[in-house]
Image (cartoon, rainbow, N blue to C red):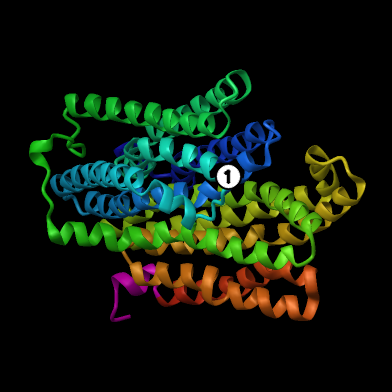
């Protein structure tokens, strides 16, 4: 922990804590692509539809974990900076058991309400059986899914950066291998996909638990996993949940925004939906890497804030934003110039390749803006400013995006729909800059200035 947070070279510290988080996001993206690819090999539309329908349920389970994981990460990092290591260990303990208890609750309720949940997700008679097969195994694995997804964040705040990345990569690697075994070799379809996902997360969770046992044996003063030390302190729980909710809402609201977007694109036919789907998956690379950089840097920002180190907080934020903008600019150049080649990897139809390449060119220009938006969001989460991060999340995915899709569709039809993301994030970038300036480190730590 101290080796990273007390690193004098701030650009180096950001890379040390940010790159592993980015690699973790990259492995998750690769797993998602592989999951879609292997299920598609069944060539059974009902099975493919079932996996698609179940994605929101999996996202919600992960998001509940992030309420405790991301919330605890912010609180722990600030407490370490303030020198309150005993309190940070209690927070770590609370968040870990909160994930386990929540996972068990999701498991029980999920299995009891399996068919009603499948119906709410949109399953019909044709794909109900496949949807329930997938959900059943996802709910069985819920405690491990929540523990693995939440501990990634709290590990980073406690300085266990390498361990956090290894666990994430391990779970995704097991998932991909088992996808091939269960779906291709054993022909288990959606059930096999869900089993692979749950087993992958179980492996990651067991690895994390092993790491925690080792750390406690080494008497790491930041780690406490004994059930006897669990305390549901209302003040601490309130801090964790209040900070964690905006972070968890990001993925949930992104899913809702994409549902709205897909409905508008669907007006222009299935070819348009297919082209956008491929372009969006390619565009996810800069998105996920930007999220990884911002989430990885957040504990460092929280540490400086807790330490009342105004100078290094401002410097770390500035350098992280520069890294994010530069990364986005590189992806914009690569995706714009290679749009046709990237589309050709997934498609063979010439008309679809041309349309997908055009969509990718329209989408890729937002990548540099992510370096500002995601870092400002993580900045407020790291500092415990829940209202600010929640404001950005709601503006991005609800109050700007949904009206934006309708308005741009009205004036510019399909191209307008595709450009909505760029337009919204252009406006949001200005808002984020103003919000950061009004809550800059100097003003936060010296309110009288």
Residue 308 visible, this angle: no
Task: Residue at 38% x, 59% y: name it.
Answer: 313
* Residue 236 pos. (x, y %): 17, 57
Query: Is residue 199 located in the magenta-colored stretch of the structure?
Result: no
Q: Position of 72 compared to 220: left or right?
A: right
Q: Quadrant of the N terminus?
A: top left
Question: Quadrant location of residue 147?
Answer: top left
Q: In this view, which residue lies farthest toward the front? A: 125
Q: In this view, which residue lies farthest toward the right? A: 350
* Mark 1 surroundings: few (<14), some (14-19) or many (≥20) residues within 10 A: many
Instruction: State the extent of the magenta-drawn residues as a range.
Output: 439-449
Query: Is residue 447 located in the magenta-colored stretch of the structure?
Result: yes
* Residue 262 pos. (x, y %): 66, 61
Q: Position of 35 compared to 21: left or right?
A: right
Q: Position of 340 compared to 49: left or right?
A: right
Q: Quadrant of the C terminus?
A: bottom left
Question: Quadrant location of residue 8?
Answer: top left
Task: Residue at 71% x, 34% y: name it.
Answer: 43
Task: Residue at 29% x, 41% y: name it.
Answer: 158
Residue 151 visible, this angle: yes
Above or below 140: residue 210: above
Q: Position of 336 compared to 158: left or right?
A: right
Above or below 64: residue 420: below
* Residue 325 pos. (x, y %): 61, 57
Above or below 320: residue 135: above
Task: Residue at 51% x, 73% y: name it.
Answer: 395
* Residue 97 pos. (x, y %): 21, 42
> Could you say which is closer to the camera, residue 362 or residue 417?
417
Residue under label 1, please give it: 127
């Amino acid at each position: 922990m101290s080796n990273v947070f007390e690193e004098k070279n701030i650009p180096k510290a950001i890379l040390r804590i940010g790159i592993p988080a980015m690699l973790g996001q990259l492995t998750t993206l690769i797993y998602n692509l592989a999951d879609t690819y292997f299920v598609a090999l069944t060539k059974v539309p009902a099975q493919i539809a079932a996996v698609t329908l179940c994605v929101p349920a999996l996202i919600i389970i992960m998001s509940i974990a992030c309420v405790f994981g991301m919330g605890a990460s912010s609180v722990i990092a600030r407490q370490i900076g303030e020198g309150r290591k005993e309190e940070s260990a209690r927070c770590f303990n609370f968040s870990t058991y909160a994930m386990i208890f929540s996972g068990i609750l999701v498991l029980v309720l999920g299995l009891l309400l399996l068919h009603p949940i499948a119906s709410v997700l949109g399953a019909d008679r044709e794909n109900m059986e496949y949807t329930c097969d997938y959900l059943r195994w996802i709910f069985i694995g819920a405690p491990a899914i929540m523990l693995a997804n939440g501990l990634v964040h709290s590990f980073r705040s406690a300085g266990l950066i390498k361990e956090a990345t290894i666990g994430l990569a391990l779970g995704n690697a097991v998932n991909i291998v088992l996808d091939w075994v269960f779906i291709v070799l054993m022909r288990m379809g959606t059930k096999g996909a869900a089993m692979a996902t749950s087993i992958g997360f179980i492996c990651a969770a067991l690895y994390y638990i092993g790491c925690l046992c080792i750390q406690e044996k080494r008497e790491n003063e930041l780690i406490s996993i004994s059930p006897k030390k669990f305390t549901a302190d209302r003040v601490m729980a309130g801090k964790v949940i209040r900070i964690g909710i905006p972070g968890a809402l990001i993925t949930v609201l992104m899913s809702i925004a994409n549902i709205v977007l897909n409905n508008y694109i669907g007006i222009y036919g299935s070819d348009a939906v297919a082209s956008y789907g491929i372009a969006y998956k390619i565009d996810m690379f800069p998105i996920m890497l930007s999220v990884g950089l911002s989430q990885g840097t957040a504990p460092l920002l929280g540490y400086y804030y807790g330490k009342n180190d105004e100078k290094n907080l401002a410097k770390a934020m500035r350098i992280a934003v520069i890294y994010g903008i530069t990364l986005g600019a590189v992806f914009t150049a690569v995706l714009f110039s290679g749009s046709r080649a990237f589309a050709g990897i997934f498609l063979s139809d010439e008309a679809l390749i041309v349309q997908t390449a055009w969509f990718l060119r329209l989408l890729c220009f937002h990548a540099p803006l992510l370096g500002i938006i995601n870092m400002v969001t993580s900045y407020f989460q790291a500092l415990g400013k829940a209202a600010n991060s929640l404001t950005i999340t709601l503006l991005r995915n609800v109050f700007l995006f949904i009206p934006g899709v309708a308005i741009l569709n009205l004036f510019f039809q399909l191209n307008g729909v595709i450009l909505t993301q760029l337009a919204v994030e252009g406006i949001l970038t200005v808002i984020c800059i103003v919000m950061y300036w009004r809550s800059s480190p100097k003003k936060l730590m010296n309110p009288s200035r």
